[in-house]
Amino acid sequence: DVVMTQSPLYLPVTPGEPASISCRSSQSLLHSNGHNFLDWYLQKPGQSPQLLIYLGSFRASGVPDRFSGSGSGTDFTLTISRVEADDVGVYYCMQALQTEGFTFGPGTKVDIK
Amino acid sequence: QVQLVQSGTEMKKPGASVKISCKASGYTFANFAISWVRQAPGQGLEWMGWISAYNGDTNYAQKFQGRLSMTTDTSTSTAYMELRSLTSDDAAVYYCARGSPFCSGNNCYSYWAQGTLVTVSS
């Protein structure tokens, strides 16, 4: 199984400041089609998860451009250029390459300082 | 607009089964797989598997093999997830989700239902 790790697991942030979360996979997520099968989700308190970034770096529809995804292979980063109060919640990365099953990272809780 | 709506809260005893529905609307049901993800209280997200709404093909996570079944009813655009032999470890919120054509159809989840709480207690 592909194991996903995230760091940090808790991230206190200051509104207006940048923030980044790292996600690493135990196997390369680079598909033969050139895309990385790595997604980022945000689960706000009391809500269902929502897709932020797909295929490593593509912003989902309606996602503010302060969110960006980067990386390739086994190392990925989600960056928030200027954190807003509405960005609090738990951020998960998910690998969607392994046909035997997808796996989520443990989650990173983002909170306002 | 695309909507996924799940059935309500379930209270089950250990050893019982639970079957949750996920009714889709706003798109052609057969065009996308439905996936299921669960979240134990205070824990992270756990991928369970998916079912093709086109031909019924399934792909289950290894840990659920043998006690998980996913089905669809194309006449009502509804997907079902049944989990058998429940234990306290199965207490969780269960979500159905749908993919996006931008990520090969099922490699990212653009739409999520509201979730169904399943409690397991004697």
Image (spheres, coloured by chain):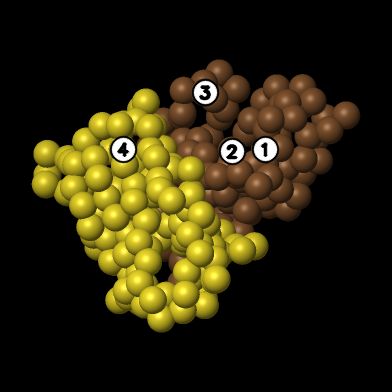
Chain colours: A yellow, B brown
Residue B74 in the image, given as x and y percentages of width and height: 49, 47
Determine crowd level at label 2: few under 14, some 14-19, many 20+ residues with C-alpha closer than 10 A: many
* Disc 2 chain ID: B
Q: Nearer the viewer, mark 1 or mark 4?
A: 4
Q: Nearer the viewer, mark 1 or mark 3?
A: 3
Residue A75 in the image, given as x and y percentages of width and height: 25, 45
Q: Which residue is mark 2?
A: B81
Measure the alpha-carbon separation of dots 4 and 2.
Answer: 28 Å
Residue B41 in the image, given as x and y percentages of width and height: 68, 45
Q: Which residue is mark 4?
A: A25
- Kind of element beneath mark 4: strand
The three-letter amino acid code for the residue at tag 1 is: Lys
Both on one chain, marks 2 and 1? yes
| Farthest bottom residue in view | A16
Measure the alpha-carbon separation of dots 2 and 1.
Answer: 6 Å
* Disc 3 chain ID: B
The three-letter amino acid code for the residue at tag 3 is: Lys
Q: Residue at x 77, y 44 (%)?
A: B10
Please give left or right for residue B32 compared with residue B102 in the image: right
Q: Do we see residue B53 in this rendering?
A: no
Q: Which mark is residue A61?
A: none
Please give left or right for residue B33 compared with residue A35 in the image: right
The picture quadrant where one finds residue A21 is bottom left
Q: Which mark is residue B63?
A: 3
Q: Are marks 2 and 1 in contact (CB under 8 Å)?
A: yes
The three-letter amino acid code for the residue at tag 4 is: Ser
- Kind of element beneath mark 2: strand
